């Protein structure tokens, strides 16, 4: 069987980078999408290639549909189209309580999150329907199900993403396409390293496994859902949080 093509949006750092490494080592052809982290993305692709994998970098702002379209066309023209989409691009949000937040602050996160996920999924689905195979994986957050102060914009946007994925699972299943949510809790990445140590220790102490997740933990979950053998797993919400979120 030929290599499956995996596009990871926001793939240069954190969870995206861990997923790129893991999938690259397991025989997938990896496309690392990034916006500004050119050097980091190039170094990641070089590392994967030097270890016997196959990785490419693609610069595109996934808030811009024309850039998304060009990215998917490049993959199709040069490598036959996307088989697996890991929608992971991080969208800025204003961390404020509801009473202090404006609609524009709230809607900016909601619009950016859903527009990027929607358009990427749209182009990915076109390729996957042709292939009669596809894996859509959206990186959400346990904050979509378990609210925390100041995260109303982020949690609401991720909640919309969760529901969106269920609809894709329902509509695209007949084409051999699955759609699933992975919802990490706190993950130790460069984006969270600035969080107060007291906060990290509080999260750790409240977590059943008594550990905070690493990007590799989320990458392992992604690696499971992309497998051929995972064809009957779709429409799910998989929390990777050491049990910090229990449904």
Image (cartoon, helix red, strand yellow):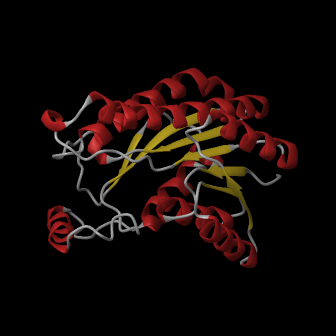
Furthest residue toward right: 77
> Where, by quadrant of the figure, is residue 224 drawn?
bottom right
Asked whether residue 126 appears in the rendered view, the answer is yes
- Compared to residue 115, the image places residue 18 above or below, namely below
Residue at (29, 45) in percent of width and height: 94
Look at 56% across and 57% down and name the residue there: 223
Q: Residue at position x 67%, y 51% from top?
A: 6
> Where in the figure is residue 145, as x and y percent of width and height?
26, 39
Task: Please state the horizontal and vertical placement of residue 132, each as a whole percent of the image.
Answer: 74, 32
Residue, far top = 171
Residue 44 horizontal/vertical position (percent): 64, 71
Q: Is residue 84 left or right of residue 201?
A: right
Q: Quadrant for residue 80, please give it.
A: top right
Q: Quadrant of residue 241?
A: bottom left
Report whether residue 82 is seen.
no
Q: Viewer-proximal residue, 99 or 90?
A: 99
Which of the image's four quarters has the C terminus?
A: top left
Residue drawn where x is 78% and y is 30% of the image: 130
In this orientation, which residue lies closer to the viewer: 247 or 190? Answer: 190
């Amino acid at each position: 069987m030929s290599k499956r093509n995996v596009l990871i949006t926001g793939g240069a750092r954190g969870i995206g980078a861990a997923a790129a490494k893991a999938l690259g080592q397991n025989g997938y052809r990896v496309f690392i999408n990034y916006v500004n982290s050119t050097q980091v993305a190039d170094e990641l692709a070089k590392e994967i290639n030097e270890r016997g994998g196959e990785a490419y970098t693609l610069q595109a702002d996934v808030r811009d549909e024309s850039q998304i379209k060009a990215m998917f066309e490049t993959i199709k023209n040069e490598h036959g189209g996307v088989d697996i989409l890991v929608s992971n691009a991080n969208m800025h949000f204003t961390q404020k309580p509801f009473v202090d937040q404006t609609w524009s602050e709230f809607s900016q996160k909601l619009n950016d999150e859903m527009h990027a996920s929607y358009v990427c999924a749209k182009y990915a689905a076109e390729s996957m329907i042709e292939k009669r195979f596809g894996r859509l994986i959206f990186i959400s957050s346990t904050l979509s199900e378990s609210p925390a102060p100041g995260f109303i914009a982020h949690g609401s946007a991720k909640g919309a993403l969760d529901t969106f994925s269920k609809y894709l699972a329902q509509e695209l299943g007949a084409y051999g396409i699955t759609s699933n949510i992975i919802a990490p809790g706190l993950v130790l990445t460069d984006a969270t390293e600035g969080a107060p140590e007291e906060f990290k220790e509080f999260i750790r102490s409240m977590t059943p496994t008594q550990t905070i997740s690493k990007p590799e933990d989320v990458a392992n979950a992604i690696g499971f859902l992309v497998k051929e053998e995972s064809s009957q797993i779709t429409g799910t919400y998989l929390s990777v949080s050491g049990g910090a979120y229990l449904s």
